[in-house]
Image: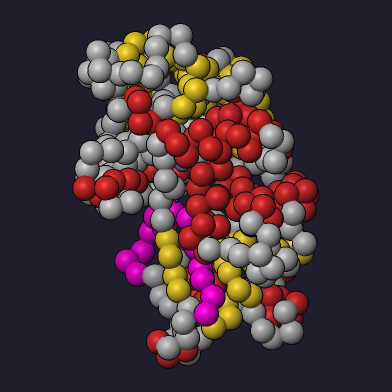
């Protein structure tokens, strides 16, 4: 079979590989909609997870089941399924402890385009199909649904980690597709003043549509100063980080009220340390909590999140600025994600 792969750090290309084998609990899926992730860009061009050779990229897909293992109960050949980016091993102790994304070790629930071939192949392998697939409901566009693989669960997890409550003032730093889903989630959770930090005009427009009350442009001045001015020096209750770099933590701590929480879902691909400002952290006594996490995956999460699309509470279609048709467009889609033209939020390839 054909796949679009990382050949080595900084290099990508089409390769031929054996179709993956299906274990007794597993499924083999043929993609019908796929999307590249900023994490694929970090993986290839920044070497963020180290060297990988001839590894098929991609971890966001909706597909059709073409084979199931003998012990799979709930899925059959021909089912159309949503595939989460994170596919845990559900019998591991980390999963039993509630951290299935770390099943088998730190971040080890992230398998596609990390420890095994991803979804930019003519076929791909899903471990523990009963625990990791969800049926695509009739009437849901596969292109909209592919945002449930990663963008929705990740953006929403930032808001879960920050523990946004009714009436909280919230800053979302970064309004690419992940941050935009954090804006939508914070609004659903009842945020009051919802400050979105970004600069691209179309992202700003969509952030407002998802519920941002104020836009902070980080290119037009220090974001801490801008937030402090808007909050009369008080700061905010919650900060979600979905963009920026290691130094963004410093700013997040600075703009947070005592007792506040930071939820980070940004992928920190470089440097050895993340620094926290001592004084603004209350010299260690400010009750400012920093939480960071990989998105929770698995079947239940997908089944729940897709109901937000079914009930019209969430419209992921707003993210899809570039729709490409045909499997061979996987390369073009990834390059769009790498080059980030100004009008891009998220590309999707429909097969
Ligand atoms: P994008 O690159 O599309 O968006 C990044 C956002 O951050 C943009 O709005 C950008 O602004 C803004 N930004 C950039 N630099 C700064 C800065 N210095 N200060 C403030 N804002 C800044 O990324 P995605 O939305 O696709 O992904 C966001 C992050 O989430 C990535 O690091 C990705 O790897 C990670 N991720 C994490 C996952 C998880 O499970 N935890 C899963 C999937 C992704 P501008 O408008 O100028 O572009
Ligand atoms: Zn991703």
Q: To which quarter of the image does residue 146 belong?
A: top right
Q: Nearer the viewer, residue 321 or 69?
A: 69
Left or right? Give the position of 47 relative to 61. left
The vertical placement of 207 against 138, above or below, is below
Total marks in image: 0
Stretch in magenta: 259-273
- In percent of width and height, residue 56 lies at 36, 27
| Residue 150 appears anywhere in the view | yes
Q: Is residue 268 magenta?
A: yes
Quarter holding the N terminus is top left
Q: Nearer the viewer, residue 149 or 200?
A: 149
Left or right? Give the position of 255 relative to 41. right
Q: At 28% across and 31% down in the image, what residue appears?
A: 116
Q: At 68% across and 60% down in the image, what residue appears?
A: 190
Left or right? Give the position of 221 relative to 57. right
Q: Is residue 160 magenta?
A: no
| Residue 57 appears anywhere in the view | no
The dominant secondary structure in magenta is loop
Q: At 62% across and 61% down in the image, what residue appears?
A: 172
- In percent of width and height, residue 293 lies at 41, 56
- In percent of width and height, residue 64 lies at 46, 14
Quarter holding the C terminus is top right
- In percent of width and height, residue 274 lies at 39, 70
Left or right? Give the position of 200 relative to 133. right
């Amino acid at each position: 079979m054909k796949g679009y792969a990382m050949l080595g750090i900084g290099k990508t290309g089409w390769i031929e590989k054996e179709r993956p084998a299906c274990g007794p609990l597993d499924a083999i899926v043929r993609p019908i909609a796929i999307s590249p992730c900023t994490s694929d860009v970090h993986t290839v061009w920044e070497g963020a997870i180290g060297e990988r050779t001839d590894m098929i990229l991609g971890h966001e897909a909706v597909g059709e089941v073409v084979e199931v293992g003998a012990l799979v109960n709930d899925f059959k050949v021909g089912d159309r399924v949503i595939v989460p980016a994170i596919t845990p091993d559900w019998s591991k102790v980390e999963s039993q402890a509630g951290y299935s994304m770390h099943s088998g070790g730190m971040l080890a629930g992230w398998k596609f385009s990390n420890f095994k071939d991803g979804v930019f192949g003519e076929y791909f392998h899903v471990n523990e199909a009963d625990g990791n697939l969800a049926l695509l409901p009739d009437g849901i566009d596969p292109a909209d649904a592919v945002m449930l693989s990663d963008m929705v669960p990740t953006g929403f997890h930032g808001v879960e980690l920050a523990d946004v409550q009714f009436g909280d003032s919230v800053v979302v730093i970064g309004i690419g597709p992940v941050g935009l889903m954090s804006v939508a989630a914070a609004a659903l959770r009842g945020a009051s003043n919802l400050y979105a930090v970004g600069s691209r005009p179309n992202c700003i427009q969509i952030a407002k549509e998802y519920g941002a009350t104020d836009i902070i442009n980080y290119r037009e001045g220090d974001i801490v100063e801008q937030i402090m001015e808007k909050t009369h020096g008080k700061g905010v209750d919650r900060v979600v980080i979905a963009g920026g770099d290691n130094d963004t933590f410093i700013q997040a701590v600075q703009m947070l009220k005592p007792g506040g929480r930071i939820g980070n879902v940004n992928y920190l691909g470089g440097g050895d340390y993340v620094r926290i400002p001592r004084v603004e952290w209350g010299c260690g006594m400010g009750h400012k909590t920093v939480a960071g996490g990989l998105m929770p995956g698995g079947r239940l999460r997908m089944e729940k999140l897709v109901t937000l699309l079914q009930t019209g509470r969430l419209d992921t279609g707003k993210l899809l600025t570039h729709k490409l048709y045909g499997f061979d467009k996987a390369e073009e889609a990834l390059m769009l994600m790498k080059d980030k033209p100004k009008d891009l939020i998220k590309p999707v390839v429909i097969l």
